[in-house]
Amino acid sequence: MRTFDLTPLYRSTVGFDRLFSLLDQGNGFEAAPGYPPYNIERTGENDYRVTVAVAGFGQDDLAIEVKENTLKIRGEHKDKQDKAGEVLHQGIAARAFERVFQLADFVQVKDASLENGLLHVDLVREIPEAKKPRNIPIGNGSAKSEQPQVIAAKAA
């Protein structure tokens, strides 16, 4: 396996510490288990949807948790009933699972729904006004040009 030195990137970028830490750890790119299958879709400019195939699980068997830019989806059958019949072939998985997704900054869970064996989790990226790009006027260094800028800043 190759190792990469990310030190030059640390020196020339600002605010990407979390991304580089994930790259350094390497665990963000390991092969994920295949159960349950899922899709990640972009449904709009700032809207996303994670769809997880959870056949055999009900609403009470599923849990969704968001904590520190991490979305966890867990499934566990709460009522383990032994059926009267003998199972000749078990093709439908009934095991517990946990899927973890890393969310980008300012991505929040908007809604979740369960329909036809698919769990849909809708996400939206809402960037606060303070974090959006803004234009900064350039003054010529005289005191007169600074006063209107201060007044405009107080009004905003």
Image (spheres, rainbow, N blue to C red):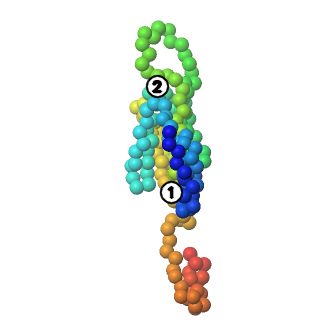
Can you identify the residue that label 2 sits on?
A: 56
Percent x, y of residue 76: 55, 27
Disc 2 residue type (three-letter): Gly
Disc 1 residue type (three-letter): Glu
**Which numbered circle lies on residue 126?**
1
Helix, strand or loop at label 1? It is loop
| 56 shown above or below 9 | above
- Residue at 54% x, 13% y: name it: 82
Q: Name which quarter of the figure residue 45 lies in.
A: bottom left
**Which numbered circle lies on residue 150?**
none
Helix, strand or loop at label 2? It is loop
Q: Earlier in the sequence, mark 2 or mark 1?
A: 2
User: Is residue 71 visible in the rendered structure shown here?
Assistant: no
Q: Name which quarter of the figure residue 60 lies in.
A: top right
Instruction: Count neighbours of disc 2 (C-alpha within 10 A) and say few if under 14, some if 14 to 19, many if 20 or more.
Output: few
- Residue at 40% x, 48% y: name it: 42
Q: Distance between the residues labelled 2 and 1?
A: 34 Å
Percent x, y of residue 145: 55, 88
